[in-house]
Amino acid sequence: MFDLLGLRQFVLAAAAVLAMLTPSFGQDFDTKAKFAVLMDYDSGMLLFHKDADQRLEPASMAKLMTVAVVFNELRNGRVKMTDAFFISEHAWRDGGAKSGGSTMFAELNSKVPVEDLLTSVIVQSGNDAAIALAEGIAGSESTFANMMNRLGEEIGLTGSHFTNATGLPDPDQYSTARDLANIARYIIGNFPEYYHIFSIPEFTWNKIRQSNRNSLVEMGIGVDGLKTGHTEAAGYGSVVSTPEGGRRLIAVVHGLKSMNERAEEARKLLLWGTRSFDRIPVYPKGKTVGFANVYGGEEPQVPLIGQGDIDLFIPKGARDCPQATITYKGPLRPPVEEGSQVAQLNIICGGVVVQTAPLYAGATVNEGGIVRKATDALKQLALGWL
């Protein structure tokens, strides 16, 4: 047991415990979804997960990474909303009406402004629009996929690989529920000037009006994004977010049997998240939570901090709560860069991990001298690292 003033006393364990978690975290909630995540936006803490790190076929939810790359290009001035991109044979045939999938109904050999292509991708899930954006920005869809993967590395995705801009099935394209939530978190946090596009109720192109495929946007429950997806093999999924309940939550559900089931399971997960916890502020942004050992560094330890404020979300009525551990694969080896994700905070109630949050290096620790390396080697040989 620990008290909230004693978080620096957290046990520093050497192995990750995430794989041992039960699907429902021992909490009074479950979902029909095969994969699910509920994330606190501010801290990145997982309030719930179910197979969060198992590979899944992202379907059109992969378009969130497509959108993230486009937003980056707009931010950096390499692309403008008024630029017009060509609708190629590939975009028209493989992403247009002939393909039988989600489409903008853009005409072959036409030019469409980036603003309209982007709106179509977000609202209509237009495959032709996604391909046109990819080709207009990178010259080819495969080169654009390389940009998606590079950005994924920068964001810190650990279980994703992208091969196309649409999310159309490809055995080499995959993601995880946790990664999809983190892409959404990246978009919400870094591009507030564009985020409103996700809540546009409908969009018309070529005289064809289509409603936002995220039906929760129009349900009046506060959902303001982000993206749905479906393939025959993967089932139905969505990534959604709401600021209701005094904090922003991001939910991911996938592997469901119908659009209605997808909407209902996402709604239930968000509702549970907004009503089932007592929020306890613990550490403000930048406050040291604990320390991790560094083998052969100029300093023996590195401080660990949250990316933002760290609040605990304690299930209402929970007993023997909270306890906590910090886990990381260690000892860490230098250089450890400030801001890099190196550890995980685990909140325990009733002997079960109920929430996790990423922890980041609060300082840079460079490689130490020969004396430090020799001392650490002796420690590891004689005592091991806890």
Image: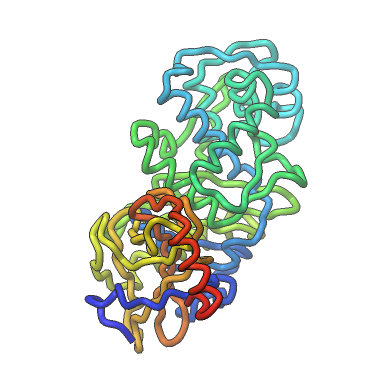
Q: Residue at x 59, y 31 (%)?
A: 147
Image-based side of 50 in relation to 78, left or right: right
Q: Residue at x 50, y 13 (%)?
A: 83
Between 307 and 98, the one lying in front of the other is 307
Image-based side of 298 in relation to 260, left or right: left
Where's residue 17, x and y in %?
53, 74
Using the image, determine if residue 49 lies above or below residue 253: below
Q: Residue at x 43, y 66 (%)?
A: 293
Q: Residue at x 37, y 54 (%)?
A: 41
Using the image, determine if residue 265 lies above or below residue 308: below
Is residue 219 visible in the rendered structure shown here? no
* Quadrant where the N terminus is found in the figure: bottom left
Count of numbered circles in the view:
0
Figure coloring:
rainbow
Q: Residue furthest front?
A: 371
Using the image, determine if residue 52 lies above or below residue 144: below
Image-based side of 270 in relation to 246, left or right: right
Is residue 272 visible in the rendered structure shown here? yes
Q: Quadrant of residue 8?
A: bottom left
Where's residue 330, x and y in %?
51, 66
Between 6 and 382, the one lying in front of the other is 382
Where's residue 271, x and y in %?
39, 64
Between 45 and 274, the one lying in front of the other is 45
Where's residue 24, x and y in %?
52, 75
Using the image, determine if residue 98 lies above or below residue 351: above
